[in-house]
Protein backbone atom coordinates (compact mmCIF):
# COMPACT_ATOMS: atom_id res chain seq x y z
CA UNK A 1 0.00 0.00 0.00
CA UNK A 2 1.94 3.00 -1.25
CA UNK A 3 5.42 2.56 0.21
CA UNK A 4 4.06 0.29 2.96
CA UNK A 5 4.81 -3.41 2.45
CA UNK A 6 2.33 -5.63 4.28
CA UNK A 7 1.55 -9.32 4.41
CA UNK A 8 -1.53 -10.18 2.34
CA UNK A 9 -2.95 -11.83 5.47
CA UNK A 10 -3.64 -9.08 7.99
CA UNK A 11 -5.70 -8.91 11.15
CA UNK A 12 -8.92 -6.94 11.79
CA UNK A 13 -9.14 -5.84 15.42
CA UNK A 14 -12.86 -5.00 15.62
CA UNK A 15 -13.85 -8.30 17.25
CA UNK A 16 -11.50 -7.72 20.19
CA UNK A 17 -13.89 -5.35 22.01
CA UNK A 18 -17.15 -6.44 23.64
CA UNK A 19 -20.30 -7.47 21.72
CA UNK A 20 -20.98 -5.27 18.64
CA UNK A 21 -17.54 -3.69 19.15
CA UNK A 22 -18.72 -1.92 22.31
CA UNK A 23 -17.16 -2.11 25.76
CA UNK A 24 -14.14 -4.00 27.01
CA UNK A 25 -13.29 -7.52 25.87
CA UNK A 26 -14.69 -10.35 28.01
CA UNK A 27 -11.11 -11.64 28.35
CA UNK A 28 -8.53 -8.84 28.29
CA UNK A 29 -5.53 -11.17 28.54
CA UNK A 30 -6.98 -13.27 25.73
CA UNK A 31 -7.36 -10.14 23.56
CA UNK A 32 -3.75 -9.11 24.22
CA UNK A 33 -2.67 -12.67 23.37
CA UNK A 34 -4.47 -12.54 19.99
CA UNK A 35 -2.65 -9.32 19.04
CA UNK A 36 0.72 -10.70 20.10
CA UNK A 37 0.06 -13.96 18.25
CA UNK A 38 -0.78 -12.01 15.08
CA UNK A 39 2.65 -10.39 15.17
CA UNK A 40 4.34 -13.68 16.16
CA UNK A 41 2.75 -15.31 13.08
CA UNK A 42 4.42 -12.64 10.94
CA UNK A 43 1.33 -10.50 10.22
CA UNK A 44 2.35 -6.90 9.46
CA UNK A 45 -1.07 -5.30 8.86
CA UNK A 46 -3.54 -4.59 11.67
CA UNK A 47 -6.81 -2.82 10.93
CA UNK A 48 -8.46 -0.82 13.69
CA UNK A 49 -10.47 2.31 14.55
CA UNK A 50 -11.07 4.46 17.60
CA UNK A 51 -14.76 3.63 17.09
CA UNK A 52 -14.04 0.08 18.31
CA UNK A 53 -14.67 -0.05 22.03
CA UNK A 54 -14.72 3.00 21.53
CA UNK A 55 -11.03 3.80 22.05
CA UNK A 56 -10.50 0.54 23.95
CA UNK A 57 -9.28 -1.46 20.98
CA UNK A 58 -6.61 1.07 20.06
CA UNK A 59 -5.45 1.15 23.68
CA UNK A 60 -5.31 -2.68 23.69
CA UNK A 61 -3.16 -2.62 20.55
CA UNK A 62 -0.80 -0.18 22.22
CA UNK A 63 -0.67 -2.21 25.45
CA UNK A 64 -0.03 -5.45 23.56
CA UNK A 65 2.43 -4.30 20.92
CA UNK A 66 4.15 -0.96 21.64
CA UNK A 67 6.96 -0.31 20.99
CA UNK A 68 5.84 -1.53 17.60
CA UNK A 69 8.05 -3.65 15.33
CA UNK A 70 9.27 -1.59 12.34
CA UNK A 71 7.54 -3.93 9.89
CA UNK A 72 4.12 -3.57 11.51
CA UNK A 73 1.63 -1.17 9.92
CA UNK A 74 -1.50 -0.16 11.81
CA UNK A 75 -4.32 1.07 9.60
CA UNK A 76 -7.05 3.11 11.24
CA UNK A 77 -10.21 4.80 10.08
CA UNK A 78 -12.02 8.00 10.94
CA UNK A 79 -15.43 9.35 10.02
CA UNK A 80 -17.75 7.68 12.53
CA UNK A 81 -18.23 7.86 16.29
CA UNK A 82 -20.23 5.60 18.58
CA UNK A 83 -23.38 6.55 20.44
CA UNK A 84 -24.76 5.08 23.67
CA UNK A 85 -26.91 2.59 21.70
CA UNK A 86 -23.88 1.24 19.83
CA UNK A 87 -24.77 3.14 16.64
CA UNK A 88 -22.14 4.61 14.31
CA UNK A 89 -23.14 8.28 13.79
CA UNK A 90 -21.07 10.03 11.12
CA UNK A 91 -18.31 12.39 12.31
CA UNK A 92 -16.99 13.77 9.05
CA UNK A 93 -16.84 17.52 9.69
CA UNK A 94 -13.25 18.75 9.23
CA UNK A 95 -12.82 19.59 12.93
CA UNK A 96 -14.16 16.15 13.92
CA UNK A 97 -11.69 14.48 11.55
CA UNK A 98 -8.76 16.52 12.91
CA UNK A 99 -9.73 15.56 16.46
CA UNK A 100 -10.13 11.90 15.42
CA UNK A 101 -6.65 11.78 13.87
CA UNK A 102 -5.08 13.27 16.98
CA UNK A 103 -7.08 10.87 19.20
CA UNK A 104 -5.89 7.86 17.15
CA UNK A 105 -2.29 9.07 17.47
CA UNK A 106 -2.69 9.39 21.25
CA UNK A 107 -4.47 6.09 21.81
CA UNK A 108 -2.12 4.09 19.58
CA UNK A 109 0.96 5.91 20.91
CA UNK A 110 2.19 6.96 17.47
CA UNK A 111 3.66 10.20 16.05
CA UNK A 112 2.41 9.45 12.53
CA UNK A 113 -0.44 7.22 11.33
CA UNK A 114 0.68 4.92 8.48
CA UNK A 115 -2.71 4.82 6.78
CA UNK A 116 -6.04 6.45 7.55
CA UNK A 117 -9.24 5.44 5.81
CA UNK A 118 -12.10 7.91 5.56
CA UNK A 119 -15.11 5.83 6.55
CA UNK A 120 -18.15 6.90 4.56
CA UNK A 121 -21.78 5.80 4.27
CA UNK A 122 -23.62 4.21 7.18
CA UNK A 123 -24.18 0.81 8.75
CA UNK A 124 -26.33 -0.20 5.75
CA UNK A 125 -23.50 0.45 3.29
CA UNK A 126 -22.18 3.20 1.02
CA UNK A 127 -24.29 6.34 0.55
CA UNK A 128 -23.70 8.42 -2.61
CA UNK A 129 -22.56 12.02 -2.15
CA UNK A 130 -19.48 14.20 -2.28
CA UNK A 131 -16.65 13.41 0.13
CA UNK A 132 -14.63 16.47 -0.88
CA UNK A 133 -14.89 18.51 2.34
CA UNK A 134 -13.95 15.54 4.51
CA UNK A 135 -11.24 14.13 2.27
CA UNK A 136 -9.62 17.54 1.79
CA UNK A 137 -9.38 17.83 5.59
CA UNK A 138 -7.53 14.50 5.74
CA UNK A 139 -5.28 15.49 2.83
CA UNK A 140 -4.32 18.60 4.83
CA UNK A 141 -3.41 16.45 7.84
CA UNK A 142 -1.35 14.29 5.50
CA UNK A 143 0.48 17.38 4.25
CA UNK A 144 1.16 18.32 7.88
CA UNK A 145 2.93 14.98 8.29
CA UNK A 146 0.42 13.32 10.65
CA UNK A 147 -0.67 10.70 8.09
CA UNK A 148 1.47 8.78 5.57
CA UNK A 149 -1.22 7.37 3.30
CA UNK A 150 -4.94 7.77 2.73
CA UNK A 151 -7.72 5.39 1.81
CA UNK A 152 -11.51 5.30 1.73
CA UNK A 153 -13.95 2.85 3.25
CA UNK A 154 -17.60 1.98 2.68
CA UNK A 155 -17.33 4.01 -0.53
CA UNK A 156 -19.06 3.99 -3.92
CA UNK A 157 -16.89 3.81 -7.06
CA UNK A 158 -17.76 7.49 -7.69
CA UNK A 159 -16.49 8.44 -4.23
CA UNK A 160 -13.29 6.46 -4.83
CA UNK A 161 -12.73 8.45 -8.04
CA UNK A 162 -13.55 11.74 -6.29
CA UNK A 163 -11.04 10.96 -3.51
CA UNK A 164 -8.39 10.22 -6.15
CA UNK A 165 -9.01 13.64 -7.71
CA UNK A 166 -8.10 15.24 -4.36
CA UNK A 167 -5.16 13.11 -3.15
CA UNK A 168 -3.68 9.68 -3.95
CA UNK A 169 -5.28 6.74 -2.17
CA UNK A 170 -3.54 3.42 -1.51
CA UNK A 171 -6.54 1.28 -0.52
CA UNK A 172 -10.28 0.89 -0.54
CA UNK A 173 -11.88 -0.98 2.36
CA UNK A 174 -15.42 -2.12 1.53
CA UNK A 175 -17.78 -4.98 2.37
CA UNK A 176 -16.98 -7.90 0.10
CA UNK A 177 -16.99 -11.67 0.43
CA UNK A 178 -18.13 -14.80 -1.44
CA UNK A 179 -21.77 -13.78 -1.04
CA UNK A 180 -21.45 -9.98 -1.50
CA UNK A 181 -19.92 -9.28 -4.87
CA UNK A 182 -21.10 -5.68 -5.54
CA UNK A 183 -17.50 -4.49 -5.85
CA UNK A 184 -16.31 -6.96 -8.50
CA UNK A 185 -15.76 -4.27 -11.14
CA UNK A 186 -14.19 -1.87 -8.62
CA UNK A 187 -11.69 -4.53 -7.50
CA UNK A 188 -10.57 -5.04 -11.08
CA UNK A 189 -10.28 -1.29 -11.71
CA UNK A 190 -8.19 -0.82 -8.56
CA UNK A 191 -5.99 -3.82 -9.46
CA UNK A 192 -5.17 -2.07 -12.74
CA UNK A 193 -4.16 1.04 -10.75
CA UNK A 194 -2.03 -0.89 -8.24
CA UNK A 195 -4.37 0.03 -5.37
CA UNK A 196 -5.17 -2.45 -2.60
CA UNK A 197 -8.71 -3.65 -2.00
CA UNK A 198 -9.30 -4.70 1.61
CA UNK A 199 -12.62 -6.51 2.11
CA UNK A 200 -14.28 -6.04 5.46
CA UNK A 201 -16.59 -8.82 6.73
CA UNK A 202 -14.54 -11.37 4.71
CA UNK A 203 -16.23 -14.12 6.73
CA UNK A 204 -19.60 -12.37 6.82
CA UNK A 205 -18.90 -10.32 9.97
CA UNK A 206 -21.89 -10.20 12.32
CA UNK A 207 -23.84 -12.49 9.91
CA UNK A 208 -21.43 -15.40 9.30
CA UNK A 209 -21.35 -16.73 5.74
CA UNK A 210 -23.67 -19.70 5.33
CA UNK A 211 -23.81 -21.60 2.08
CA UNK A 212 -24.35 -25.23 1.18
CA UNK A 213 -22.07 -24.78 -1.81
CA UNK A 214 -19.30 -23.41 0.39
CA UNK A 215 -19.77 -26.29 2.81
CA UNK A 216 -19.64 -28.82 -0.05
CA UNK A 217 -16.40 -27.39 -1.48
CA UNK A 218 -14.86 -27.29 2.01
CA UNK A 219 -15.86 -30.91 2.68
CA UNK A 220 -14.35 -32.07 -0.62
CA UNK A 221 -11.07 -30.31 0.27
CA UNK A 222 -11.16 -31.51 3.88
CA UNK A 223 -10.97 -27.85 4.93
CA UNK A 224 -13.19 -25.51 6.93
CA UNK A 225 -15.67 -23.24 5.10
CA UNK A 226 -13.85 -20.22 6.61
CA UNK A 227 -10.53 -21.36 5.11
CA UNK A 228 -12.16 -21.71 1.72
CA UNK A 229 -13.80 -18.26 2.00
CA UNK A 230 -10.45 -16.64 2.82
CA UNK A 231 -8.50 -18.61 0.21
CA UNK A 232 -11.08 -17.59 -2.40
CA UNK A 233 -10.54 -13.90 -1.56
CA UNK A 234 -6.76 -14.26 -1.89
CA UNK A 235 -7.22 -15.92 -5.27
CA UNK A 236 -9.87 -13.40 -6.39
CA UNK A 237 -7.30 -10.73 -7.29
CA UNK A 238 -3.66 -9.96 -6.39
CA UNK A 239 -4.63 -6.57 -4.92
CA UNK A 240 -6.91 -8.15 -2.27
CA UNK A 241 -5.54 -7.94 1.28
CA UNK A 242 -7.23 -9.86 4.10
CA UNK A 243 -8.18 -8.48 7.54
CA UNK A 244 -10.39 -11.21 9.04
CA UNK A 245 -11.37 -10.58 12.65
CA UNK A 246 -11.25 -12.95 15.56
CA UNK A 247 -11.02 -12.83 19.33
CA UNK A 248 -9.48 -16.30 19.46
CA UNK A 249 -5.85 -17.34 19.09
CA UNK A 250 -7.02 -20.75 17.85
CA UNK A 251 -9.19 -19.20 15.12
CA UNK A 252 -6.39 -16.83 14.14
CA UNK A 253 -3.98 -19.74 13.63
CA UNK A 254 -6.64 -21.73 11.75
CA UNK A 255 -7.34 -18.79 9.45
CA UNK A 256 -3.69 -18.07 8.69
CA UNK A 257 -3.09 -21.74 7.85
CA UNK A 258 -6.38 -22.15 5.97
CA UNK A 259 -6.07 -19.08 3.74
CA UNK A 260 -3.14 -20.72 1.96
CA UNK A 261 -5.42 -23.42 0.54
CA UNK A 262 -5.06 -23.76 -3.24
CA UNK A 263 -8.44 -23.77 -4.99
CA UNK A 264 -8.78 -25.52 -8.34
CA UNK A 265 -10.69 -24.23 -11.37
CA UNK A 266 -13.49 -26.63 -10.41
CA UNK A 267 -13.62 -25.23 -6.84
CA UNK A 268 -13.59 -21.64 -8.12
CA UNK A 269 -16.34 -22.39 -10.62
CA UNK A 270 -18.56 -23.86 -7.93
CA UNK A 271 -17.87 -21.00 -5.48
CA UNK A 272 -18.65 -18.47 -8.21
CA UNK A 273 -22.33 -19.47 -8.06
CA UNK A 274 -22.70 -18.30 -4.44
CA UNK A 275 -22.65 -14.58 -5.15
CA UNK A 276 -24.91 -14.73 -8.21
N1 LIG B 1 -14.57 -0.11 7.28
C1 LIG B 1 -15.62 -0.55 7.90
O1 LIG B 1 -16.68 0.07 7.90
C2 LIG B 1 -15.53 -1.87 8.61
C3 LIG B 1 -16.71 -2.52 9.02
C4 LIG B 1 -16.59 -3.74 9.64
C5 LIG B 1 -15.36 -4.31 9.87
N2 LIG B 1 -14.21 -3.66 9.48
C6 LIG B 1 -12.89 -4.27 9.67
O2 LIG B 1 -12.88 -5.53 9.03
C7 LIG B 1 -12.43 -6.54 9.92
C8 LIG B 1 -13.06 -7.86 9.57
O3 LIG B 1 -14.43 -7.85 9.82
P1 LIG B 1 -15.09 -8.61 11.06
O4 LIG B 1 -14.05 -8.97 12.04
O5 LIG B 1 -16.22 -7.78 11.54
O6 LIG B 1 -15.77 -9.85 10.39
P2 LIG B 1 -15.20 -11.22 9.73
O7 LIG B 1 -13.71 -11.18 9.66
O8 LIG B 1 -15.98 -11.43 8.51
O9 LIG B 1 -15.69 -12.29 10.78
C9 LIG B 1 -15.31 -12.24 12.12
C10 LIG B 1 -16.18 -13.27 12.84
O10 LIG B 1 -15.83 -14.59 12.39
C11 LIG B 1 -15.52 -15.38 13.51
N3 LIG B 1 -14.39 -16.23 13.13
C12 LIG B 1 -13.19 -15.85 12.62
N4 LIG B 1 -12.42 -16.92 12.37
C13 LIG B 1 -13.12 -18.01 12.75
C14 LIG B 1 -12.85 -19.40 12.74
N5 LIG B 1 -11.69 -19.88 12.29
N6 LIG B 1 -13.81 -20.25 13.21
C15 LIG B 1 -14.98 -19.77 13.66
N7 LIG B 1 -15.31 -18.45 13.69
C16 LIG B 1 -14.38 -17.58 13.24
C17 LIG B 1 -15.14 -14.45 14.62
O11 LIG B 1 -15.49 -15.03 15.86
P3 LIG B 1 -14.35 -15.39 16.95
O12 LIG B 1 -13.99 -14.09 17.60
O13 LIG B 1 -15.04 -16.35 17.85
O14 LIG B 1 -13.23 -16.01 16.20
C18 LIG B 1 -16.00 -13.22 14.32
O15 LIG B 1 -17.27 -13.36 14.93
C19 LIG B 1 -12.82 -6.00 11.28
O16 LIG B 1 -12.11 -6.65 12.32
C20 LIG B 1 -12.52 -4.53 11.12
O17 LIG B 1 -11.13 -4.31 11.35
C21 LIG B 1 -14.30 -2.46 8.83
Image (cartoon, helix red, strand yellow):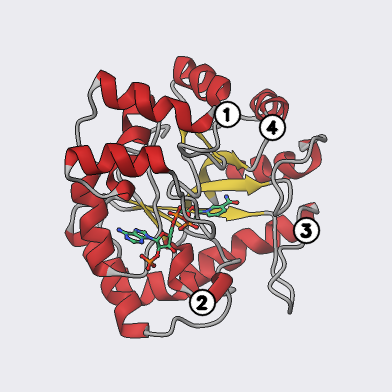
Q: Nearer the viewer, residue 230 or 87?
A: 230
In the picture of the structure, the residue carrying the numbered disc 1 is 183
Camera-nearest label, 2 or 3: 2
Picture quadrant of residue 162: top right
Camera-nearest label, 4 or 1: 1
Mark seen at residue 95: 3
Estimate the x, y position of residue 89 in percent, counting from the top left: 77, 62
Label 1 secondary element: loop
Mark seen at residue 156: 4
Seen at 71% across and 63% down, the residue is 88
Label 4 secondary element: loop
Q: Do the residues labelled 2 and 3 touch (CB within 8 Å)?
A: no
Q: Which of marks 4 and 2 is nearer the N terminus?
A: 2
Q: In this view, does 20 lie above or below 97?
A: below
In the picture of the structure, the residue carrying the numbered disc 2 is 56
Picture quadrant of residue 271: top left
Rounded to the nearest angstrom, the CA distance separating label 2 from label 1 is 31 Å
Rounded to the nearest angstrom, the CA distance separating label 3 from label 4 is 24 Å
- Point out the quarter of the image occupied by ligand 1: bottom left
Estimate the x, y position of residue 96 in percent, counting from the top left: 75, 60
Please state if 275 lies on the left or on the right of 161 as rendered. left
Amino acid sequence: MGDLTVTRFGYGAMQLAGPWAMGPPADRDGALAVLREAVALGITHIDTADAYGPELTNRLIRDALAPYPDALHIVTKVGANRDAQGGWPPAREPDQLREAVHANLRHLGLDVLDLVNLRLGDAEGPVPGSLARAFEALAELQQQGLIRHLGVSNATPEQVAEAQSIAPIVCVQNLYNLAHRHDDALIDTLAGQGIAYVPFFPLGGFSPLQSETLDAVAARLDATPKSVALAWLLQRSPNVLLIPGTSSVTHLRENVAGAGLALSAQDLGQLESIGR
